[in-house]
Image (cartoon, grey):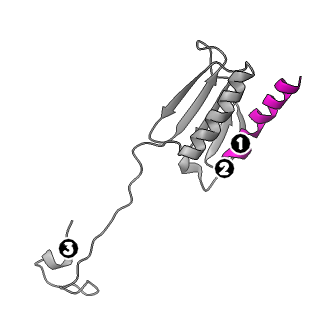
Amino acid sequence: MLRGSEFDGPAQPGSAPSGSSRIIAFPRAPLQVGFDRPELMRILDLYGRMVAAGQWRDYAMDFGKDAASFCAFRRTAERPSARVEKRPALRGKQGIWALYGEAGQVLKRGHELASVLFPLERKLLKVVDG
């Protein structure tokens, strides 16, 4: 980094005085997107209840540069029956969170994790009651 006092060239108009230091910070994109502890606890709580109801048996998590995803499986060798995905780049558009079904269709998008998980919660209630 270049500090104002270390610069030996002539002073430019609008630059900091020679006695003060100026640090320029550039925002960087995160190297990996992940889940916060409360988010992961919410997802794993739902996973545990679905396992207890006999709906899910296995899960997988993927953390990439653009997105983090949690996939739940009925059987290990199948496609995921549900996938919860977090994409921070969509914060200002459709929302960070998305829920995908077994065929890859978008079931729900939103800014809050609880509202995106609601279709799975409703499915769990039907399984337990019925």
N-term-proximal mark, 2 vs 3:
3
Q: Amino acid at mark 3?
A: Arg
* Disc 3, SS: loop
In the image, is residue 124 part of the stretch drawn in magenta?
yes
Q: Which residues are magenta?
A: 112-130
Looking at this view, name the residue that lies furthest to the top: 77
Disc sitting over residue 116 in the figure: 1
Q: Position of residue 102 (x, y in %)?
A: 69, 24
Quarter location, residue 79 = top right
Mark count: 3
User: Seen in the image, is 39 located left or right of residue 4?
Assistant: right
Question: Between marks 2 and 3, how big is the CA–CA gap?
Answer: 41 Å
Q: Residue 59 at what x, y percent from top left?
A: 58, 24
Q: Is residue 24 above or below residue 9?
A: above
Task: Please tell me whether residue 30 is drawn above or below residue 77 in the rendered image.
Answer: below
Which residue is labeled 2 in the image?
Answer: 94
